[in-house]
């Protein structure tokens, strides 16, 4: 039976002690998992403190990351590629310190960086080779990498499930798998069931996200197809709600969320959990 989580990026992009009361509320609501923003690669000590606190609360956790042009593992500049690999390793160390089982995100390239062309064979090769080294480190620290396919407006390297599956196969590590995000799939996939089936052997994490990044179940995502097929392939991992607000300047620039699309963060969190539990309850027994 899947466990249910929510990404803390709905409230914050920084792990501070001021967030602990909100996390307590999420536990009281019935969440099993919180997804932590891992945007500070030097925050190992703070992540360890968060890990101890979340242990006390009885909450599981995953980590999520985003990478800029200075950390681009497919760059033609070997110094930038090296920094991308090293940044990945540091973020994995932060995830391990916090007790995260998964690090999810665009770790293979950089958000919002484009060449105006499709990825070249050299870029693909550089991404695979870099990820092999990162995956080796992931195995050492006990965290799995979940590769996220991003839509074409955010990334040009991996946009769909088929590309992600190919990438993970070529990396060839048990410590590197795929994440499926309903928001990106809604934009990029021609056939949702086929996309999810292509991930059957590599899927280790799922983001439940509406087409406008607000309350899951309130928009145009093909939810029946998504949940039906996740059940069909036997997915038993975490389902994490990913929704964003317009109140975080750093995040707004990346996600292009300009308006408020829900009553409150608490309303969104409650409705998202009820929606996920209802849809899973119809299928998983």
Image (spheres, rainbow, N blue to C red):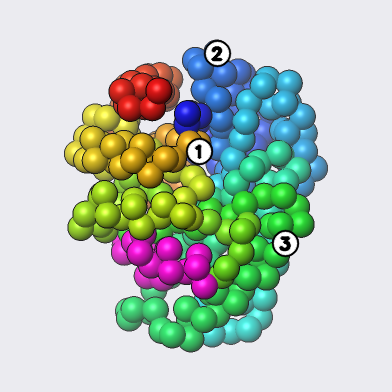
* Residue 28: numbered disc: 2
Residue at the spot 61% in from the left edge and 59% down from the top edge: 174
For residue 116, side relative to residue 32 (left or right): left
Of residues 130 and 9, the one drawn nearer to the viewer in this rendering: 130
Does residue 225 appear in the picture of this structure? yes
Image position, residue 120 (x, y; %): 41, 84
Q: Badge 1, how many Cα within 10 Å: few under 14, some, many 20+?
A: some
Judging from the image, what secondary structure is the residue with disc 3 in? helix
Which residues fall within the magenta stretch?
Answer: 152-170
Work out how far the residue at label 2 is from the one at label 3, CA to CA, in angstroms: 35 Å
Looking at this rendering, what residue extends furthest in the right direction?
A: 45
Q: Tell me which label, 3 or 1, sits earlier in the chain.
A: 3
Of residues 37 and 139, the one drawn nearer to the viewer in this rendering: 139
Looking at this rendering, what residue extends furthest in the top direction?
A: 28
* Residue 237: numbered disc: 1
Q: Tell me which label, 2 or 3, sits earlier in the chain.
A: 2
Location of mark 3 (residue): 137
Tell me where residue 172 sits by quadrant: bottom right
Image position, residue 153 (x, y; %): 31, 62
């Amino acid at each position: 039976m899947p466990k249910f989580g929510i990404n803390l990026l709905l409230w914050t992009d920084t792990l501070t002690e001021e967030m602990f009361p909100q996390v307590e509320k999420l536990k009281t609501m019935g969440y099993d998992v919180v997804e932590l923003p891992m945007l500070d690669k030097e925050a190992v000590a703070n992540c360890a403190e968060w890990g101890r606190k979340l242990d006390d609360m009885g909450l599981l956790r995953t980590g999520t990351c985003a990478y800029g042009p200075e950390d681009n593992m497919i760059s033609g500049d070997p110094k930038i590629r090296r920094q991308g690999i090293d940044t990945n390793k540091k973020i994995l160390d932060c995830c391990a310190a916090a007790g995260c089982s998964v690090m999810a995100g665009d770790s293979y390239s950089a958000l919002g960086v484009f060449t105006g062309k499709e990825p070249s064979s050299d870029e693909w090769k550089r991404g695979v080779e870099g990820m092999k080294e990162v995956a080796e480190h992931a195995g050492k620290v006990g965290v799995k990498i979940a590769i996220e396919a991003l839509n074409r407006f955010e990334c040009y390297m991996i946009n769909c499930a088929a590309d992600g599956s190919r990438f993970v196969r070529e990396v060839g590590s048990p410590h590197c798998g795929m994440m499926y995000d309903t928001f990106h799939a809604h934009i990029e996939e021609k056939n949702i069931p086929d996309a999810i089936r292509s991930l059957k052997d590599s899927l280790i994490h799922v983001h439940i996200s509406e087409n406008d990044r607000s309350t899951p179940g309130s928009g145009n995502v093909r939810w029946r197809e998504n949940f039906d097929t996740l059940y069909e392939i036997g997915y038993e991992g975490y389902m994490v709600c990913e929704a964003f607000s317009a109140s975080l300047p750093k995040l707004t620039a990346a996600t292009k969320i300009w308006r408020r699309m829900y009553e409150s963060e608490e309303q969104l969190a409650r409705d998202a959990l009820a929606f996920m539990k209802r849809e899973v309850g119809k299928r998983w027994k």
